[in-house]
Each structure stands twice: as C-alpha cells, then as structure tokens.
Amino acid sequence: MGWRSVIITQHAKMTYSMNMMVVQTRDGISQIPIADINLLLVSTTQAVITSALISKLAENQTKVIFVDEKDEPVVETVGYYPGARNLSKLNNQFNWDLQLKEKLWTKIVDRKITNQIAVLKNYQLEWQNVQDELDQLELNDATNREAIAARKYFVTLFDKTFIRRDNNAVNGALDYGYAILLASFNREIAVNGYLSYLGIHHHSEENCFNLASDLMEPFRPFVDYWVKAHEKIKQLTPDIKYGLVELLSLKIEYNNKKTILSNAISEYVHDCLCFLNEKTKELPEMEMALTNEVPNDALNDNV
C-alpha cells in the first residue's frame, strides 16, 4: 500500500519496468516506484497505459481513476482478487445483523450532519437550522433528516439560489472531490476483503459502490469545506482538480489524534467493518475536527 497520489495531466505513455511505473511525456521520462503509489488519477484522455502496469498496480492495491472527455472521473479499477478477501468474510457481509446496520447508519448520519455544522461554524455561517434537523434524528434516520439537513446546509454554505444538481463549476468541484473520496473508500473496503456492492443503507442495483457510498458520508463535508474556500471558481481547472486530490492529505484530528484524511479513512473503514462483524460491541468513534487548513503541500505528483 502506497502513500503518493500521482496525476497524469498530459499526453503520456505509462509502462511497467523493474517495479517502477515509467511515464513518458513530451517533457521527458519519469519513474515512480509502484509500491509508493496509493492513487493514480489519469486526468486526460490522451494517455496510454499498458496492461502490465495495470496488473502491477492492482497487485499493489493502487486505485486507478480515469476521466472522460469532459475531464470528469468516469471509471476506476477494482481489484478482482483482493488478497484479504475470503469466503468467510463474504458470508459475514451477506449476513450482517440488521440492527447493527441500522445503528451504524444512524451514527454515520449523526456524524455527517455534525461535520456539516462544523463547516458552517468555520465560515461563521448560520448553523442552527441544520442543528434542528440533527436534534430530530431517529434510529436508521427513519424520517430522512439527512436529506432535509443537506438542503438547508448547501443553501446556507453557498447561497439561497444554490441548487445541488445545477451544471456549474462549484457542483463540478464537489462531484470531483466526492469521486476521489469514493475511490479511497472503495480501495479500503477491498483491502479489508469485502464487497463494495453490498451497502448498509444504499441498495441501488445500478451502484457498484453502495457500501463505500454509505461509509463515506461523514467525510463529504471535508470536500465542501475545501470547495467553499474556492467558491468563486468559474471552471474546473487543473489546479482545482489537483487541490481536490490533495485533500486526501488534509491535516485533521481524528479521534483526538493528529493525522491526514487518507489515514483517518483507513482507520474508520476498519473500525466500521469490525463493528458490523461483531468484533466489537461499541459503535466506532468518529470524532473529526477541521484544522482550518486548506492543503497546499500534499504528497502528490503531477505529470
């Protein structure tokens, strides 16, 4: 498992040689150790990658994301044979206790709304209307406070005319950041040996990543926090995309420990899976705190 996020932004040929990813561009040739790469974002449709390299990246459990002609994330690699997966884990996943799933989903929604409130407070915006929805949260979010809180949250965070589904730069940045988050959660789920198809709340037959969609919810506000700081953007430029990938290296506090976002995700996913598999009776801790720092020095390579 690596630690670097690598972004390919121009016409390039990517090959494998001697445990290295070799990237050939008009500017020259770069070599990056396969073992170092946590995420590879191919942010161009003008790149060529060999099957040998894809195979080695899969062995390293590196997540690879490709974009379409609009530079939007469109597909990612999912390891077919994750080393940690076995039949007993899959049997457990198919038979996770309904009450445990409901309790965990309640905690996830609670933490998501709590983090949304923290973002609003950070920007000195009115937050009580979102708090009101959190105060009404019931088991398994039976009254769908998550959706109601989200509507109030976004119009407060941006402006009263903001519509989440509009085709604009801010929504594009949000979607791009969420896609990076989703890929990170998919990777952690696979590393732990489970299927992303089977969620605890999301059950769409068209969503291959239901479990990741569930677990990532409390982390979405970190993307919102970053995008709010850049809300005057007019288009989804390469710099904005770089910043959203760098968000994985945002310094935060997680369960009273200083860490970076990607490490918090890893610990959080592991703890959630332990709870669902009844390895612990206590709901996982999810205390997350912003450090009021927008990352500028993340561990990324832009080629």
Image (cartoon, rainbow, N blue to C red):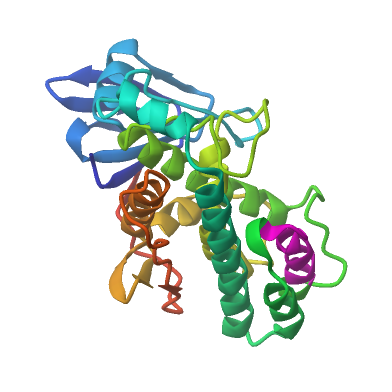
Q: Residue furthest left?
A: 18
Pick the quarter of the image with the N terminus: top left
Residue in view at x 54 percent, y 57 percent: 103
Where is residue 122? Give x, y as percent. 57, 82
Query: Visible in this render: residue 93?
Result: yes
Residue 117 lies left or right of residue 96; in this view the side is right
**As drawn, 229 above or below 33:** below
Q: Main secondary structure of the magenta part?
A: helix
Query: Visible in this render: residue 33?
Result: no
Q: Residue furthest right?
A: 161
Magenta-tinted stretch: 141-155
Residue in view at x 65 percent, y 56 percent: 140
Is 84 or 143 nearer to us in this picture?
A: 143
**Is residue 18 on the magenta stretch?**
no
Is 199 or 160 nearer to us in this picture?
A: 199
Is 4 or 256 nearer to us in this picture?
A: 256
Where is residue 146? Give x, y as percent. 70, 61
**Is residue 143 on the magenta stretch?**
yes
Residue 29 lies left or right of residue 142; in this view the side is left
Residue in view at x 12 percent, y 21 percent: 18
Where is residue 168? Give x, y as percent. 76, 52
Residue in view at x 74 percent, y 67 percent: 149
**As drawn, 283 above or below 235:** below
**As drawn, 169 above or below 145:** above
Q: What is the tally of numbered marks visible in this picture? A: 0
Where is residue 198? Give x, y as percent. 53, 32
